[in-house]
Image (cartoon, rainbow, N blue to C red):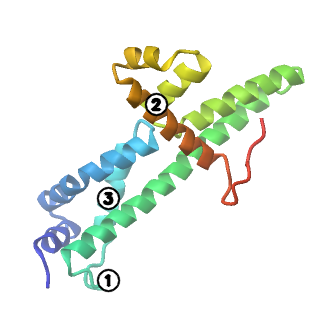
Amino acid sequence: MKGEFFEIVENASLGSEDSMMEVIGKFTPTIKKFSRELGYETSETDLIISLINIIKRIKLNTLKLDNDGVIISYIYNALKTKKIDLFRKHVKGIQDELEINLELIKGEDDRNYNDIENKLFVKEILQILTKNQRDVLVKKFIEGYSDIEIADNLHISRQAVNKMQNKALKILRIYLTDENGVKKYKM
């Protein structure tokens, strides 16, 4: 049984701008969430473009997507996959940029080189966090502020600081270890 959202998606895939705007509106919370997770400036725009492309290429009849819940789930999963692709592309771009920068400074003594390499590595891995998570970790571990000082500075509660810190450290721990729990990087 074809639902109301089926018709909206079908019309959007056939070129209806109003229907496309309805689909985008339906997925705006998801796009905003994924954009925050990606953490780079143009991520929201990239996700909206991806959603439009998903809708334009969707084959509702071939995939037997006649139930609104199935359609929503299909689009959500396609968008989630695109978020992962964008993350990989963004992180790969940062890594390429870091490699170029490191090549420029290699002639200096090893200690200075290692210090710069470590700083660049820390800067790179912090980019996978949200802005607030990054701010909390930098203020806590690099600038040496207490939780209370960070809370006052960011205008949030001390508990929120602790929660952001724990979430950020968990994300970094996952990023820095492989699927067997072995550290991928040595500093």
Q: Amino acid at mark 1?
A: Leu
**Residue 8 in picture, x, y percent from top left:** 14, 68
Determine the CA span between mark 3 and mark 1.
17 Å
**Callout 1 secondary element:** loop
Q: Is residue 13 visible?
A: yes
**Callout 3 secondary element:** helix
Please state the total of marks drawn on the protein image.
3
Above or below 21: residue 5: below
> Where residue 51 is drawn, which disc sits there?
3
**Callout 2 secondary element:** helix
The quarter of the rendered structure image containing the N terminus is bottom left
The residue that label 2 is drawn on is 162
**Residue 100 in picture, x, y percent from top left:** 71, 34
Mark 3 vs mark 1: which is more N-terminal?
Answer: 3
The quarter of the rendered structure image containing the C terminus is top right
Q: Quadrant of residue 154?
A: top left
Q: Amino acid at mark 3?
A: Leu
Q: Is residue 92 visible?
A: no
> 59 left or right of 100?
left
User: Residue drawn 72% across and 37% down?
Assistant: 99
**Residue 166 in picture, x, y percent from top left:** 51, 37
The residue that label 1 is drawn on is 63
Mark 3 vs mark 2: which is more N-terminal?
Answer: 3
Above or below 144: residue 38: below
Mark 1 or 2, closer to the camera = 2
Q: Nearer the viewer, residue 101 or 122?
A: 122
Q: Quadrant of residue 115?
A: top right
> Where residue 108 is drawn, which disc sits there?
none
Above or below 140: residue 128: below
Determine the CA span between mark 1 and mark 2.
45 Å
User: Residue drawn 70% across and 60% down?
Assistant: 180
Dot 3 surroundings within 10 Å: few (below 14), some, or many (20 or more)? many
